[in-house]
Image: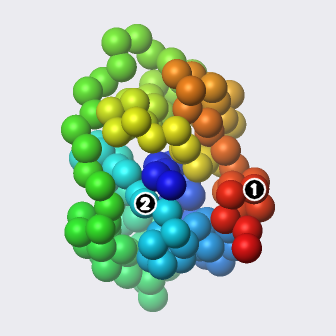
Amino acid sequence: MRIILDTNVLISGVFFAGPPYQILEAWRDGKVKLNVSPEILEEYQRVGEELSGDFPSINIQPILDLLTIRAEIVSAPSLSEPVCKDPDDDKFLACAISCKCQWIISGDKQLLAVSGFRGITVIKPRKFLDEYLSV
């Protein structure tokens, strides 16, 4: 199963425990495949570096390095029209369309509001774990 992680999910999984961390573990263990675009990677890096100032004991660079090796990186042209209320979130939909991925894991209300766009399901981390990754 291929997925895309919204920045809030990836960062939460790196800095905290809980469902986002469990999803990263599932990726590490090969239960899901992670797809990203260069624009998503840039956002992951920027937000991770900002939070690193508040959590100096956590180094986000190893996970970013792993993403560049183990995630599928796809070129994702911008959408022809904005879809999300926050146009910055459109990059996740563009990535999903480009790699034909039907799952975006997110806690962002504005991104969740467009679930169903072109057959893409935007789902919260806990619900994804419970419905798709439970043993």
Which of 25 and 21 lies nearest the eye of the viewer?
A: 25
Query: What x and y, as percent, mark residue 23?
Result: 58, 67
Q: In this view, does 26 lie to the left or right of 94?
A: right
Residue at position x 22%, y 38% from top? Answer: 75
Circle 2 sits on which residue?
33
Q: Quadrant of residue 78?
A: top left
Q: Which residue is drawn at 40% across and 11% down?
A: 81
| Residue neighbourhood size for the residue with mark 2, other residues' Cα within 10 Å, grouped as few (<14), some (14–19), many (≥20) | some
Q: Is residue 90 above or below residue 122?
A: above
Question: Camera-side residue: 65 or 60?
Answer: 65
Q: Is residue 107 shown left or right of residue 15?
A: right
Q: Residue 21: x, y in percent? A: 59, 73
Local crowd size for mark 1, using a 10 Å CA cut-off: few (<14), some (14–19), many (≥20): few
Q: Position of residue 46 (x, y in %)?
A: 34, 56
Determine which residue is flagged by label 1.
131
Amino acid at dot 1: Glu
| Element under disc 1 | helix
In the shown orientation, is residue 121 left or right of residue 71?
right
Left or right, 128 with reference to 111: right
Residue 101: % across, % down: 45, 41
Q: Outermost residue, bottom direction?
A: 57
On-image quarter of the C terminus: bottom right
Amino acid at circle 2: Lys
